[in-house]
Amino acid sequence: MKKLLLILCAFMIAMPNYAQKLSKAEKKAAEQKAHDKAAEYIKAKDFIIVPASYEDGDGIMQSNTNNSNFLLCQMKTMYAQGSIVCGNSYTNQVEATEFLPKFDKKGNLRLSIVVSGRMLRGTYTISMRHNSNMADVIFTPINGKTRKFRGPVESPKEASYNKRSNPI
């Protein structure tokens, strides 16, 4: 009876560790699937990035809960809305004059997009690691202050964002 109780106790101690390893593998597979989908959206030039966090004027990362800030790409037309993304409060409709995605051997993505519009000109540099769909974005305008933010790369059909009417 004591042996049976001892074996049962050892089994109960070992079981959570085994289940945790399975969840890590499942988590890694889910992250890889999300990255692959994000890479497909970028290659198709049909994606949106709604910032989850951004760098404020003091260089401190802040959380963002406002879905009115976003960077939307639809083929050659892009929409940048909100002060976090583009430095003004308008819905900027811009043309992507250069769209240069580069994948390295590991699958990390570095994308450079040169945009030109009425109220907005500059370069968006998007970096995405091989095991995540989170993108680090740096916007360098022709004149003004550099903007940095981070958010998931998603399909515009699946994302939740608030696009204002009458883009400039």
Image: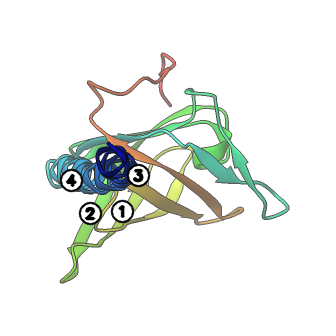
Give the CA separation, mark 2 to mark 1.
5 Å
Image quarter for residue 49?
A: top left
Residue at the image point whose x is 51% and y is 44% from the top: 118
Q: Earlier in the sequence, mark 2 or mark 1?
A: 2
x, y percent for residue 64: 65, 38
Report the number of numbered marks: 4
Q: Image check: 73 left or right of 13?
A: left
Along the viewing direction, whichever of 16 and 138 lies nearer the viewer: 16
Q: Amino acid at mark 3?
A: Ile
Q: Earlier in the sequence, mark 4 or mark 2?
A: 4
Tag on residue 105? none
State yes or no: discs 4 and 2 in contact (Cβ < 8 Å): no
Give the CA separation, mark 4 to mark 1.
29 Å
Badge nearest the viewer, 4 or 1: 4
State yes or no: discs 1 and 3 in contact (Cβ < 8 Å): no
Q: Quadrant of the N terminus?
A: top left
The answer to whether residue 73 shows anywhere in this view is no
Q: Which residue is mark 3?
A: 13
The answer to whether residue 104 shows anywhere in this view is yes
**SS at circle 3:** helix
Q: Which residue is mark 1?
A: 113
Q: Which residue is mark 4?
A: 29
State yes or no: discs 4 and 1 in contact (Cβ < 8 Å): no
